[in-house]
Amino acid sequence: MRLFLCLFIIFISREIIPQWFLQNPQWQGKLFSSVCFVDNNSGWVVGGGGTILKTTNGGTNWMTQTSGTQNDLSSVCFVNNISGWAVGDGGTILKTTDGGLTWKLETTKTLNWLSSVYFTDTETGFAVGDSGLILRTADGGTT
């Protein structure tokens, strides 16, 4: 009876306690550094070699997006389903206004590693990086 009760508790606890689940094993071994979701379904990850992936079904499936760079990307931020930015090595700042179908390389005056990006809305954003670098934009990342 005790064994049955223990097994029952273990079985029930696995069903009740939230768990992490591996998504798309074909990406194992790839370096990912940042993830951003704007709702339960739409999200992006960025990583090594300019990798950008997008999901539209909560992470069950991921589709490759063309970033246009081979630079490592360290951070991604979207404020809605269409407007997003990614930053990384060599002062790389990428912007999309179509949900990641196309990415545009924005001009920066730095070659510093940019480690994080965050936008409060479609116009105002910040990027930070090596040597205490803090960048701010008020025009959606154009300057």
Image (tube, rainbow, N blue to C red):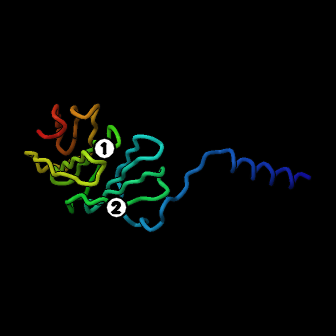
| Residue 50 drawn above or below residue 82 | below
Q: Residue 38: where, in percent of width, then height?
A: 40, 40
Place of residue 132 in the rendered image (x, y in percent of width and height, measured from the top left) = 18, 39
Give the amino acid at mark 1.
Answer: Ile
Mark 2, residue position:
64
Q: Secondary structure at mark 1?
A: loop
Element assignment for label 2:
strand
- The quadrant the C terminus occupies is top left
Q: Residue drawn 26% across and 48% down?
A: 86
Q: Is residue 81 left or right of residue 113?
A: right
Residue 109: which quarter of the image?
Answer: top left
| Residue name at image x 31 percent, y 48 percent | 99
Identify residue type, mark 2. Thr
Q: Is residue 93 above or below residue 31?
A: above
Instruction: Say the numbered circle drawn on residue 82.
Output: 1
Q: What's the residue at 30%, 46% (across, down)? A: 76
